[in-house]
Image: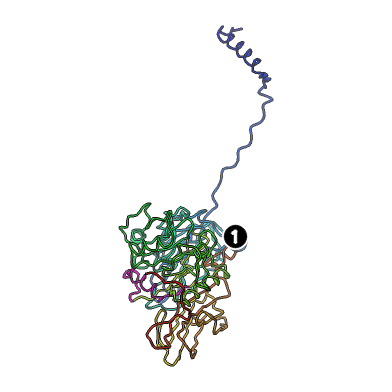
Amino acid sequence: MRKLPVFLVAGAAALATLSLQLGIRPTASVSPSRAAPPKPLMPLPRLSPEGVVAFEILDAATGERIPGKLTFVGILGTPDPLLTHGDIGREDEGGISAYNRTYTIAGVGAVRVPHGAYDIYVSRGLEWDRYVARNVRLDARGFELRAPLRRAFETPGWISADFHVHAAKSSDSRVPMIDRVYEFAADGVEMIVSTDHNVLSDYAPYIAEAGAGKYLHSAIGDELTSNGWGHFGAFPLPEDLEAPGGGSVLLRGRNAHDFFRDIRAIAPDAVIDIHHPRIDQEIGYFNLGQLDSANDEARRPGFSYDFDAVEVLNGYQDPERRSVDRNIEDWFSLIEHGHLVTATGNSDSHHLKLNIGGFPRNYVAVAEDRPAALKSIEVARAVKGHHSFFTTGPFVDLRVNRGRLGEVVLAKEGKAHVEIDVSAAPWVAVSEVRVYLDGKEKERFAVPPSSESLRFHKTLDWTLQRDGFVVVRVDGDKPMTPIVGDNKRFTVYPLALTNPVFLDVDGNGAFDAPKRSKVERKK
């Protein structure tokens, strides 16, 4: 028998002595025949088998390919597909896919979708009818989808715009800016404003990269995100603006009066829009400023009325009508006291799933309505002039004595002739129209279900005793699922609200607010 070297024997004896000193008991040796069997290996993950949906989206009137959105809805036990599991889109042939949607600018492409049974909805925003391919059984053979879309109504002289959009430069968003371009162009939004938190972002290079300039215009903005005063949108801002931290103004240790004054200094034509004014106690400006709008009082020092617009509908509040109603009451009270600010509705998009970009959106009256020829300054001036309305679905045309939104029209002898037209795509419900005079409901009309584009037409004749303002609100009683929302965690109903037409009864050429303001609005 071969002997071990002396140094190994000595080493083993020393190790045994050290183990006893440390209180470590030697373990019994286990014979190979009695060793525990190895644990079975977990199976490797496998991808679900996929089929290819080749698609083409066409303008039914011209046969041309157009941008659009595909929404895949699982049926017969098939779940909605998850083309991605997060807010960073997947590049597919001819488009970008995220969750259960594909966005295309070219109008033609192919997308990989797990095998199963689906209804596939093809849409192009609010102004177009949708196309539905029902009961599609997708397997390895794939599926060819040709979707002709019919335009439901025309909007000459108007552009659609979302003034509150977030992407990856915001600390609370991961969405790449190029994905936003695909999303907004596909859903028929014609202007996108970057409002990342305290940082300036420019969509123009990404619009050029995607070849979307025919469909989408952009403006540089900022969401001034303060600690203690709220969130404020400002656009358009200069491209070469240099400020601490890359944002537009310094916020720390300052109040709303300071913020607004700085914006006026660096961008005199910019719109200052109060974002989600009462969304909660932490970031709602009207709550933080302790605004009592009915009495035109703000109890907190530093509060300023020097803003141009109020975000009456924020995308996160689409399902919450009570919150929206409160914002409308504030807005009416501001106008009654002579603070003539514009009502806006914006998506506040942070993700690609929950609140969908462009719902709501603003329609703004402009001289040139082609996105490629649009001027951001013109849009800002139109918003400041109240020549706009916001909507998640219906399109509203309000005229009083032939005057349109934001105009001051003569009401000789108090006579007001009101004309209202409401249009909507067949898949958008319109169930109720309310007409307000001086912030009080004056008329309400039920609208029967219809698939016609023109849902409502009405003329009204009133006699007024003093100057006033007219506003129209339109509601729909059926959710816009699945084009917008999922009817589970997030449900969006049709809602539109116009800005006022102002009536000059006394003939002095101006609108005299019915209640005197208790503050002087600084300009």
Would residue 368 be found to the left or right of residue 42 on screen?
A: left
* Up-down relation of residue 173 to residue 358 (above or below): above
The answer, for residue 200, to whether it is visible in the render is no
Front-most of residues 473 and 62: 473
- In-front residue for pair 79/420: 420
In the rendered structure, the answer to whether residue 217 lies left or right of residue 467 reads left
Q: Quadrant of the C terminus?
A: bottom left
Give the quarter of the figure containing the N terminus.
top right
Question: What's the amino acid at mark 1?
Answer: Thr
Name the colouring of the figure: rainbow
Q: Secondary structure at mark 1?
A: loop
**Callout count:** 1
- Residue that appears at 41% across and 82% down: 511
Tell me, yes or no, if residue 217 can be seen here: yes
Residue 368 magenta-drawn?
yes
Q: Quadrant of residue 402?
A: bottom left
Q: Nearer the viewer, residue 248 or 479?
A: 248
- Image coordinates for residue 451, horizontal then vertical, percent: 53, 80
* Relative image position of residue 352 (x, y in whole percent): 49, 59
Q: Please report the bounds of the magenta region as a residue range.
A: 367-390
- Residue receiving disc 1: 78
Task: Give coordinates of residue 229: x percent, y percent.
Answer: 47, 59
In the displayed structure, 163 sits above or below 505; it is above
Closer-to-camera residue (301/35): 301
Q: Position of residue 432 (x, y in %)?
A: 56, 80
Dot 1: few (<14), some (14–19), or many (≥20) neighbours within 10 Å? few
- Is 319 covered by the magenta stretch? no
Does residue 392 lie above or below 449 as drawn?
A: above
